[in-house]
Amino acid sequence: MSLQDLAPENTKRAQATAVNVFTAFLASENITPEFIRATLLADANGSVLVKLLDRFAMHLAFARGRSGDLRKRNTVMRYYWNVKNWLLEDFPQHRHIVEQRLLKMGRVLERHCLKRQQGGMVTKAPACNKADLRSLIDGLYFDASSTKEYQDAALLSIMWYALGRASDLAFIQKRNLSVGSGNVLFLRLIRAKTSEEQDLSLFPDKSSFITCPLHAIAMALAMQTSPVSSVLDLEHLSGLNVGDEAPATEATPLTGALGYCSDDDEPANATSEATSPRRKFTPLKIQGYVNRVLKAASARQADAGVSTGLSSHSFRRGGAQHANADASLSPQWIFDRGSWNMTATNKAFAYVFTTTNEDRKVSKVLSDWKSNDNPTIPSAATFDSATTTKIRRLGRMLFASSLDFGDASLIVDDQVADLLVASLIQHFPEVNERYPMSPYTSRMRMCLFPLHVSMPELLGWSVELKRQASEVREEEENPSHVSSS
């Protein structure tokens, strides 16, 4: 085992795909990988490597994909850079000689691909606006027949509000949900691309329960049928069991491994692979899963005017554009929430520390509040003691797969449960009216029956929670900035 084994699965899969394309290119030229290796080993000035990558770049520029169309610019460049880096790792003696020439070749290839598509413009996934998000989630709720649709709805909602990539969601754990001051729900996640840990605030949506992130998370947790550590039960996308870990040591002793190292031998990682058996890991293919969900949901909601061609990137772009429409928000705050790399985005923006106050402003605008509003977020704890006890008993039945377990990784915090069950109660009359035969409404009625809670009583709780939620105050002129830990 080496540090290369600790690289992100998406990175390793991208390199493997590029190497397969390169191998297919060699086969089309009737050349074997062994001949290429022998030729590169005998190459003294790097000219063979430059010529090889030049021919491969020409192949990528004009080769067609499975659909019969020319490959997209991003795909072509990803293949080129991965193969270039892979060859330089195997033959590092050429790096200092040819690296600048290979970079120049890459820029020429990129300019060619850029100009051949759409008159010089890059085709990007359309932004998913708030209306698209509402139509997609509404369709999932309306056609729900199992717990999967509620998980998918929460997945789309969190992607939009967190300005996140699909791969970020694999790291969201129940224990990373918390409640801050003012009953604000905080979501802690690790960005897969930057490995940055973030605390993001989530507010209830002002316009509709369908696009409310708190309500979507609450419904997903209420519909889980078995205890899992993650907020979204997406374990079916991975072949890796929760408790599996990569082996910490190799079967080959260090002295033996070092003995194989020489300039003419295979790389050390290739030797260890041949002598040390390792468990095979299947990466979490969540991006492809999101695209399949979007394709099916968009087809069902075609009459609702959903934007065509939505992909997993559309949510990150749509949420950022929605927030940027508010002139009171600094672009830097939006970049911080989306964890964009400033050196890759715009070096003119100065780096500032992310504070809870700034992230809350962005979160409010995403939920259709004004940035200086201070909405009241109702919770089960705001009722009298008898009612609070009854509501909490209802919450324990709804969130049976997320409470009362000895393993802390499988449960949500009690304050989080109070906040989420209040959101379910607040909007249940609307949900019951819009989706009367859905699995969620049936589950809610099943949980109400043993508690002897009638629908009029539940309606009274809902009215009180809506009254509390309608109380909106403006923030103080100079609110204190509290840095998220």
Image (cartoon, rainbow, N blue to C red):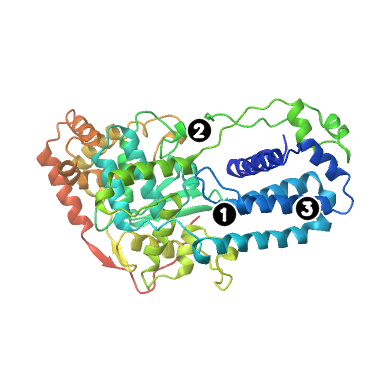
Taking 102 as reference, is 153 above or below it?
A: above
Residue 445 position, x and y percent, is 18, 33
Labels 1, 2: front one = 1
Give the mark, 2 or 3, whose residue is nearer the N terminus. 3
Taking 362 as reference, is 451 above or below it?
A: above
Tell me the tag on residue 238: 2
CA gap, disc 2 to disc 3?
40 Å
Of 343 and 135, nearer the camera is 135
Going 18% across and 28% down the picture, which residue do you hit?
450
- Say which residue label 3 marks: 51
The amino acid at mark 2 is: Ser
CA gap, disc 3 to disc 1?
22 Å
* Label 2 Cα crowd, 10 Å radius (few <14 / some 14-19 / many 20+): some
Give the mark, 3 or 1, whose residue is nearer the N terminus. 3
Instruction: Name the secondary structure under disc 3.
Output: helix
* Label 3 Cα crowd, 10 Å radius (few <14 / some 14-19 / many 20+): few
Labels 3, 1: front one = 3
Q: Report whether 5 appears left or right of 362.
A: right
Taking 128 as reference, is 250 above or below it?
A: above
Instruction: Name the secondary structure under disc 1.
Output: helix
Give the mark, 1 or 2, whose residue is nearer the N terminus. 1
Going 65% across and 59% down the picture, which residue do you hit?
109
CA gap, disc 1 to disc 2?
26 Å
Residue 57 position, x and y percent, is 68, 53
Tell me the tag on residue 464: none
Visible residue check, residue 319: yes
The amino acid at mark 3 is: Lys
* Label 1 Cα crowd, 10 Å radius (few <14 / some 14-19 / many 20+): few
Q: Report whether 416 appears left or right of 468.
A: right
